[in-house]
Amino acid sequence: MTSADVRNEAEDSGPSGYAAARLRLLGEGARSGPPRRAALSELTDDWLTGLFTAGAEGLRGVSLVAVGGYGRGELSPRSDLDLLLLHDGTDSKAVAALADRLWYPVWDLGLALDHSVRTPAEARKTSAEDLKVQLGLLDARHLAGDLGLTAGLRTAVLADWRNQAPKRLPELQELCAERAERQGELQYLLEPDLKEARGGLRDATALRAVAASWLADAPREGLADARRRLLDVRDALHLTTGRATDRLALQEQDQVAAELGLLDADTLLRQVYEAARVISYASDVTWREVGRVLRSRAVRPRLRAMLGGGKPTAERSPLAEGVVEQDGEVVLARAARPERDPVLPLRAAAAAAQAGLPLSLHAVRRMAATVRPLPTPWPAEAREQLVTLLGSGRPTIDVWEALEAEGLITRLLPDWERVRCRPQRNAVHVWTVDRHLIETAVRASEFTRRVSRPDLLLVAALLHDIGKGWPGDHSVAGEIIAKDVAARIGFDRHDVTVISTLVRHHLLLIETATRRDLEDPATVRSVAEAVGSQGTLELLHALTEADALATGPAAWSSWRGSLVADLVKRVSAVLAGDPLEDPEAAAPTAEQERLAIEAVATGGPVLALRAQTEPAQDTGQAPGEPEPLGVELLIAVPDQPGVLPAVAGVLAMHRLTVRTAELRALDLPDGVEGSVLLLDWRVAAEYGSLPQAARLRADLVRALDGSLDIAGRLAERDAAYPRRRGVVPPPPRVTVHPAASRLATVIEVRAQDAPGLLFRIGRALEDADVRVRSAHASTLGANAVDAFYVTGPEGAPLPSEEAASVARKLEDTLPG
């Protein structure tokens, strides 16, 4: 059926005919994107025109006008109809009756309607008072009735907008900034709002309004395509959900991708991010130009008076060879020759970042169009300018994005293309892969004074996740890529080895410190062997912190920092030749010994709670302000079965989060009979204050003697507070690491974090008849990664077959 046939059916059959024709049009798989939006708008135009003609017979001085998105002819399947009934004020009663004949059929079909009835004077008055109304009227389109009335309003509204632009554009910019603060940046969100987030459809409409003011214009390249892509995604979202929504929720992304014929949800997100990045960059450039024009207009009359009416000359201040500052931007000098100077893009970028100024759009485009490729390996100046750019702190981000918008980054670093706009489906990460790499370099620039080779630190920060665009372990793939990139950039063989080692092992310190027993000599020795030298260890320590800080708030804390620092200290001692201390020979502290003796004397558990703090460093807090590391919970209990699940269960009942957990048997002083287990745990309250030690001890006594039903209590709490529906997490995974320790078998559990998880794991290990020597709990966002050092009843590591069996049973026990 052709579009004409669909329109004829709608006209012949009234509202029901329109509904059927609309449904048929939206179901046509062959038509999508702009053609479908235009056809839907045309179909709706014809239907509303028919309603208007039937209801306005004999009525003069009235017209029906589409405004906003409908005025632009961009109807998505569930879009509102934005309509203005415009009249000359001669017969208000008849106009009101006409309005009823128009609005009620729309409502009867269940279509969302944003409507108003105004005279041209009222419309202009309302738009002068309400910026959003004025923006909608800028897209006014005549549908039916008095064409002269509509044309007169359009002309007047555009004239008002242009006359009021010096006042209205700053208001519009503030509106955009407030919305961005509220909704976030579309190009980084896992569940973005396609319309409201920064870089979304609202910003694209704002750029149209700026262009209509004739005061400034947005960069045109790619903008229309980016806008079209977001509209296509919104269409697919409306069709798959059947709702008028702009939020691309995680659970709907696969369906939307399939509707658009894309490979998967990641491909969909990447296209959305690319479109948002184009719109965001265009917005930055446009608002900068608006500010420049408005400042120029404010200063010009004064300058003209001083210069006797002559045209002022823009001041140009040199920044580097071929690079100058003009009007608050970095531009190319008149003598610059990009076609003869392949280092110019990096030199200009470094100068801009060092000065904290934006690179002008014209300069970037000229360099992108004319600059020659750098030779391989790069000349020393190019390498130095890259390091300077990366070490410039926060201004690096805007400058890097300006280069990337015109394709210069992928020309300098071809491997960047695989990570550009690549989403990270991990709640811990707040950035796409490419932005995370730049954020890490920015964070690393804060640590350049504490390492001997800041250049290697900055380049490793830029490249540490470069392997995420390839299949397999991104650290392994990244090592190969980093080796190639570092050699191409011009580093010598030794430096290439250091950079590739840093990339290969950028997760080593944080994962070892939070998931392994640092008292075990095998743990420290394995890290020392991987790192190889004190200089590399120093760089890896700084990279670890920079990477975590750039990941998100859940990835770093003073507690994690203290664990990493402790590991670095131990590894440094090994690299310096100091012997490792045997953990079995470590003597208990006086407090531990006191608690153990009291536990033997009382025959029950003894507890001690002690707050742990340290001065905040590099966390944004005021100097000297302590940040809590948690609370140290020391428990001494006569050796007996079920200690781990009992303690973990009691802590879960009291809503205490376990950060680290260690168990070991204590050697008692001569003359003291009995065997005592010591548990040294660090805990933190989920919310509220910590419970009293006496209450914890009382519940622990009951848990150990079996009179406290921990499993039942936790189940009751889960039932009382059911989890919200959301994304189904991946199934838990339990693995054995046979080479991680010579003293015990290391079993690692990765699962969705939940109250009582450690209790369930402890009970499963107890049922498997293994002894837990130490435990290391780590939580990143919604993911728990817990490592358990276990032995058989005699204290020896488990045989490989038995370890694998325990791991399988444990995996079956955990909730999927």
Image: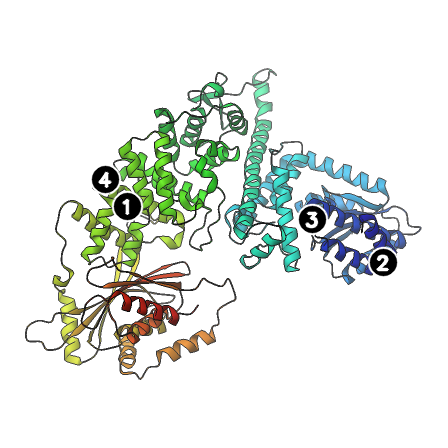
Taking the spot 37% from the left edge, 31% from the top edge, the residue there is: 488
Taking the spot 17% from the left edge, 80% from the top edge, the residue there is: 602
Check residue 133 in the rendering and tell me which mark sits there, or answer none: none
Mark 4 is on which residue type? Gly
Query: Would residue 695 be visible to someone looking at this image?
Result: yes
Which residue is more in the foreground, 634 or 347? 347
Residue 91 vs 536, above or below: the answer is below
Q: What separation in Å lies between label 1 and label 4 (alpha carbons)? A: 10 Å
Query: Would residue 126 be visible to someone looking at this image?
Result: no
Dot 3 or dot 4, earlier in sequence: 3
Q: Residues within 10 Å of mark 2 (few under 14, many from 20)?
A: some
Location of residue 490 in the rendering, given as x and y in whole percent from the top left corner:
34, 29
* Occupied quadrant, residue 71: top right
Q: Which residue carries the number 2 mark?
A: 14
Mark 1 is on which residue type? His
Q: Which residue carries the number 4 mark?
A: 535
Residue 170 vs 757, above or below: the answer is above
Dot 1 or dot 3, earlier in sequence: 3
Check residue 32 in the rendering and tell me which mark sits there, or answer none: 3
Which residue is more in the foreground, 126 or 633? 633
Mark 3 is on which residue type? Ser
Residue 475 horizontal side relative to residue 53, left or right: left
Q: Which residue carries the number 1 mark?
A: 541
Which residue is more in the foreground, 584 or 195? 584
